[in-house]
Amino acid sequence: MFANKKWMSLFTLVIIASIGLLVCAAPTSVTTLPRNETLYSNGQQWGPVVGWNPYSSSMNNAMAVTQQDSARVIMFETPYLYNMVDGKVYPLLADGPYTWDAGQTKITFNLKQAAYWSDGTPVTAADVAYTWDANIKYATNAGNNFKDYILSVTAVDAQMVVVKAKLDADGKALNPLMVAAYLSGNYVIQKAWTQKLEERAGGDATKFLADTAEDVVYSGPYHKFFADDTKVVYVRDDMYWGQSASMWGKLPTPKYLAHVIFKDNAAGSVALAQGEVDVSQQFNSNIQVLWLNYGLPISTYLPEAPYGIGASLPTAYYNLKSYGLDQLAVRKAIAIAVDYPTIIANAMTNQSATFDQVPRSLMNPTPGEQALYDHDAVNDLQWAGNDIEGAKKLLDDAGITDTNGDGWREYNGQKLSYVATCPNGWSDWQASIEVVAAAGKKIGIDITSNYPEWSVYQTVVTTSDAPLPAGYDILMMWSDGAGPTQPWGRIRHLLSSEFVGIANNWNGNWGQYSNPRVDELVQAIPSETDPAELKEMYTELVKIYLTDIPSFTLMYRPQSFHAVNESVWTGFPHQGDGTSPPVPPLNLTDGWSIAGLYNLTLVNP
Amino acid sequence: MKGYRRYFLNKALWFLVTLVCAFILNFFLPRLMPGDPVAAIVARMAQGMSNATGVQAIYQQYTELFGTNKPLLQQFFIYVNNVLHGNFGFSFSFYPRTVASVIKSSIWWTICLQFPAIIVGWLIGNTLGALAAYRKKGFDKVLMPVSIFVSNFPAFGMAVILMVVFGVGLKWFPTSGGYGFDLIPNLSWKFIWSVIVHYQLPFWSIVLIAIGMQAIGMRSMAIYELNADYVKYSRFMGIKDRKIIRYVFRNAMLPQVTGLALSIGTMVGGALVAEIIFSYPGLGYTMLNAIMGGDYPLISATTLIVTLMVLTTMFLIDIIYAFIDPRIKAAQFD
């Protein structure tokens, strides 16, 4: 009948043909990655790698091509490495610290004699200068980001580089913070290879940035080994210059760095628990369960909650044009009524410091930033949340009461009714928004939640040349993490009015707040070198922020999540691990955290 | 034969009309979704940028490159021209990869997962459904509730149960990926075995649900046919049971074949749930991301492939039906 031989043969044939097709579709080359030579990561690479072009931001090659405050330096390298734990920069390609001239108009630094490219030629000052010129010529992200602050990058000789700043009316660097930040956030790319790429692109900027650069020359310790839709693997360059005594003195321990491409956090968490991932950068819900309940050799940077160092401040912005939200009493009442401990417990599964542990300001919880403002001076302005009675009293005192007895407060006769929003599917943010909405209900303000798709949300929120439309009264967005320009950059993005009126505002201040004194301080801070003066300025900014409340922080979030499984490798960064300078918990790829790759040892050698 | 020619021409004409309509809808519908896909690209590019004019520059550069600043009608004619030249353009969300390269790298995974799952689910389901209808009694009493139970399982529920039981609990099968996390594709038994082992959970998560659905459909059809007059007449004529059953199931099979053709036609859409739960490579997740990110060229190209496959399989089924069961052809011209 149906289950006869014919059908069985057909069935077998279909299965065999399918597997055959699959195997044929895959390229054939090498075979197995030895487990005790491979370090597996997750949470960095989402979706397949597109290419290897360090000038382009379209390569979706998270581990190899990511220029940021702590640039990822496994393949391409920066002159300096930023360390978010101590807030300092350490030389990589550079030889010794950089220096500003007396007039604060230019930075000078030298390159290490030992540094050379993967093709064996030395890394020279001409490479640094040519990289900058290409960044400008082809309007790369690095070029667009720094062209307002850097005038030129020139080579004095083979080793010496001069970075000239754009100057203000007083003849000083317009923004010394940004000029210095270029050196730890942006790669040095080989001049000869860049010229080859230019030739290939025929001077066309689009082609230049779209080139996948399979032939790229690099200076870092790893390069492409394999990439497909399921994983990307980098292999160590055993000729890497950094094994010279002037840098690391040895090669990084793992021969391969591999990143399996997971479709979501849940799949990544399962792999971490099963020992198929050594370093996890993704959010693993209730991470402590893995060692407390299952006894797995998994740990985080801190042994107890919040498990990591908070660096950024996910924030709820008020749309200051919404009816009633122009009233401080309403903004403050909502902000102090929110149950932050619930947000931290539910949305972050306690992977955030509480506002009792780190009182709110504009600073992240790192000791360096916390030391930048006078805590006592703003003590009376900080709140830890859940203050329902205080919020009600505030509204009552402001005359914002329920006049018609419907249970909701009115302002000038009109009911206070708002929509709190964040993108759909961003589960931790959605949980936070629900808590904000609940707080409104407790104090007689009708707050409902709504979650548009990210593709819609981003379009609306970033249109700052018009008032936000209905449905965007309280909206959640991110803030800057840790970096050499922080906390100045974060404060600028939270409060500066320069972003109001921008058609595509990906920078910040999405609630469109404006305060001339804030703008003045934001402009003055980068040039200020006196620590006491700086502290005073930052304290004033915190005071303004906690007084005006144009937005409020909902939680602290780490620069990147960092959990490690020590089944195969050990020696990962943990707080107080004795490393000096301390290795930050940034997955052994970002900025100074790459130092961690040199400290790894095998659990079973 | 004249009737056949008219029937085929009629079907071919409808095929073309549907294709043109679907092509136009494939282009315009994704573009009517709210949201600006270029903003999504800028979001990716502008991470860490602190310069407002720089962000503006990137935005303009990409609206120009993708042509989203042009009027919709003009974009349509450019698209038609490109498609006629076999060029689906750049994918917005995977730029600078082309749509063709994105589809090419994941379509095999999808076909290799979906096609056998559809065929196996269909074969086993129909066999079991037919047996249930024929044998009745205990077999039917056990099979039917089980089929109804399994077929009503949400796909993600089935996938998660299989993963937790056979992957995490019993550790019989790996929980994620298309092949071993420590392997590089190559023509070795180790790799092939790894592909087979990784294939099992996503495969059965689709097949188990399909079996239940097919079994229920086949059982109902078969019971209806078993009570038909021709069966009774055949029995009076003394025709052997085996032969009667063959008649019965051939007739009961017709709607099932249509369902099979539709499943094969839409399989390129991917097995989204299996792909996500098991981090299995394939087009489903790519398409989901394309839709979420407003990646018009990728959405249009994949939906065009689905449209073409469905139309082609339906066209072929129509043609085959005309031969298998001339009543269908005749009914069209009554």
Image (spheres, coloured by chain):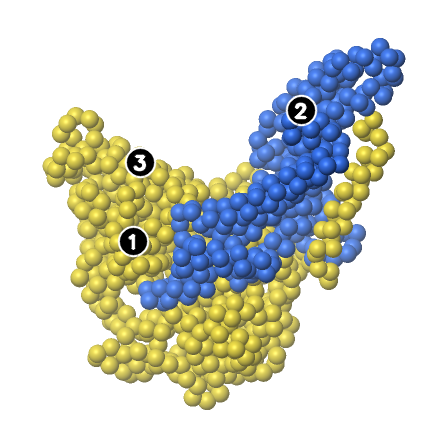
Q: Give the residue at x 35% y 39%.
A: A450
User: Same chain for the residues at labels 1 and 2, yes or no?
Assistant: no
Q: Earlier in the sequence, mark 3 or mark 1?
A: 3
Q: Measured from the top left, where is residue A500 in percent x and y?
A: 25, 58
Give SS at disc 3: strand
Which residue sits furthest bottom?
Answer: A157
Which chain identifier belongs to the yellow chain? A
What's the chain of the residue with tag 2?
B
Q: Secondary structure at mark 1?
A: loop
Residue where numbered disc 3 is placed: A448
Answer above or below: position of A181 versus B322.
Answer: below
Residue type, label 1: Trp
Q: Nearer the viewer, mark 1 or mark 2?
A: 2
Viewport quadrant of the N terminus of chain B: top right
Residue at image point 56% right, 67% down: A212
What residue sits 31% from the left and 59% below the top?
A503
Percent x, y of residue A122: 56, 83
Disc 3 residue crowd, few under 14, some 14–19, many 20+, Cα 10 Å = some
Q: Is residue B202 above or below residue A102?
A: above
User: Label 3 to label 1, Cα distance in Å?
Assistant: 20 Å
Q: CA distance from mark 3 to mark 2?
A: 45 Å
Identify residue for label 2: B217
